[in-house]
Amino acid sequence: MSGRAVPLRALRAEETLHFEDSIEHARRRLLATDLPSLPVLDRDGRLTGFFGEREAVHTLRRHDDHVGDHVRAAALGLGPDATDAEVADTFAQGRAALIPILDGTRLVGIITRRDAIRALAQHRPARPSVSMLERLQVLVGVLTFVIAILIVVVAAT
């Protein structure tokens, strides 16, 4: 792993779905987590997409469908060594609430937008402190400039 501040969230088995899972099962699992969507894996464990809150709402009147019938294509994933800048850029460019972290085709975890915001806000560089003396020096410089302009204006009239 890189020295990234944004944490990789490892997924527990109950936080994933399979292509052939029922819609009812998917809704129950989704509601049991704090995630906005759950990764959907194929029979070989590869990420095929996500089933989220939007898909759960669209399927409220359906009980015989499978998750695979309603899976949303996976957003672009990042590798395990993605930097904080790559994570931030990925979230800034799209509407995804989470980013899949892939090692080849294998899903190794996710990064949620909320976790990224929290981590990046805590690790952003502190704003340099400007001392009172430095502020006074700037103010004196500005006042000197203004006085010089006033002298030129008065002399010209």
Image: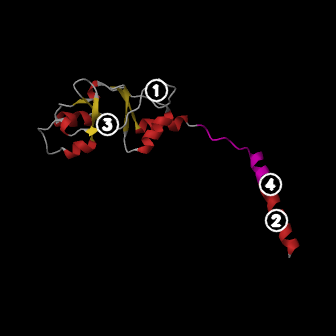
Quadrant where the C terminus lies? bottom right
Cβ atoms at labels 1 and 2 below 8 Å apart: no
Q: Nearer the viewer, mark 3 or mark 2?
A: 3
Relative to 125, 76 lies left or right: left
- Find disc 1 in the rendering and name its residue: 81
Tell me the SS state at disc 1.
loop
Q: Residue at x 27, y 42 (%)?
A: 53
Estimate how packed mark 1 is, as few (under 14), some (14 to 19) or many (20 or more) residues with alpha carbons within 10 Å: some
Amino acid residing under circle 1 = Asp
Task: Work out whether mark 4 precedes mark 3 in sequence or the reverse, and give the earlier one.
Answer: 3
Residue drawn at x 50%, y 29% is 4
* Residue corresponding to mark 2: 149
Q: Is residue 76 above or below residue 106?
A: below
Please identify the quarter of the rendering in which residue 95 is found: top left
Report the residue at 88% width, 72% height from top.
155
Looking at the image, is mark 1 or mark 4 earlier in the sequence?
1
In the rendered structure, find residue 74 and report the number of the disc placed on it.
3
Q: CA distance from mark 4 to mark 3?
A: 57 Å
